[in-house]
Image: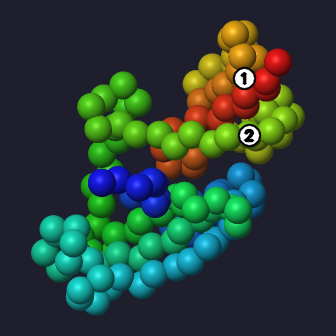
Amino acid sequence: MITGFNHSGFVVRDLQKMVAFYRDVLGLKVMREVDATKPPLSAHVGIEGAQRYLVFVGKDNEQHQLELVYYLQPKSPDTKIERHNIGAAHVCFNVKGLDKMYQELSKKGVKFAAPLVTRETPTGTVRICYGQDPEGNWLEFIENIPK
């Protein structure tokens, strides 16, 4: 029986750059770091001899975290998955003040798939957009404004 969510993860190429983005640009906090270079800390991934370093980012008041996974061994290939491919993933963040955040992130160089969209629903207004982190992982930002 599933009781809730624990974390989501992205495999990253440049761990320091990605930590800086999620911490300094998006305002998340480094919650914990795990040196998974010695068995049995990587045994569950099913890759013989895997050595990884993990950084979990999140918010103090939230249980769900984002895991940034850096493979020391074996090195990750430079293959890129387009957002419409099978296996593609994204993380969605709840936001307050999305208009302002969209403008600030745009000024900081965050690339968005399309301009911010507003939809009216029976329960209120939904503001939504898709952007990318520095390595091309897709991020969704959504603001629900009740009636």
Residue marked by disc 1: 127
Q: Quadrant of the N terminus?
A: bottom left
| Mark 1 vs mark 2, CA separation in Å | 9 Å
Whether residue 8 is visible, yes or no, is no
Q: Quadrant of the C terminus?
A: top right
Label 2: how many residues lie within 10 Å, few (<14), some (14-19) or many (20+)?
Answer: some
* Residue 41 vertical placement versus 6 (above, below): below
Q: Is residue 50 left or right of residue 135?
A: left
Instruction: Give the SS element for disc 2.
Output: loop
Label 1: how many residues lie within 10 Å, few (<14), some (14-19) or many (20+)?
Answer: some
Give 32 or 131, whichever is nearer the viewer. 32
Residue 20 percent across, percent down from the top left: 66, 64
Q: Is residue 59 left or right of residue 53?
A: right
Question: Is the C-beta separation of discs 1 and 2 under 8 Å?
Answer: yes
Residue marked by disc 2: 95
Residue 127 percent across, percent down from the top left: 72, 23
Residue 34's quadrant in the figure? Answer: bottom left
Q: Is residue 114 left or right of residue 83?
A: right
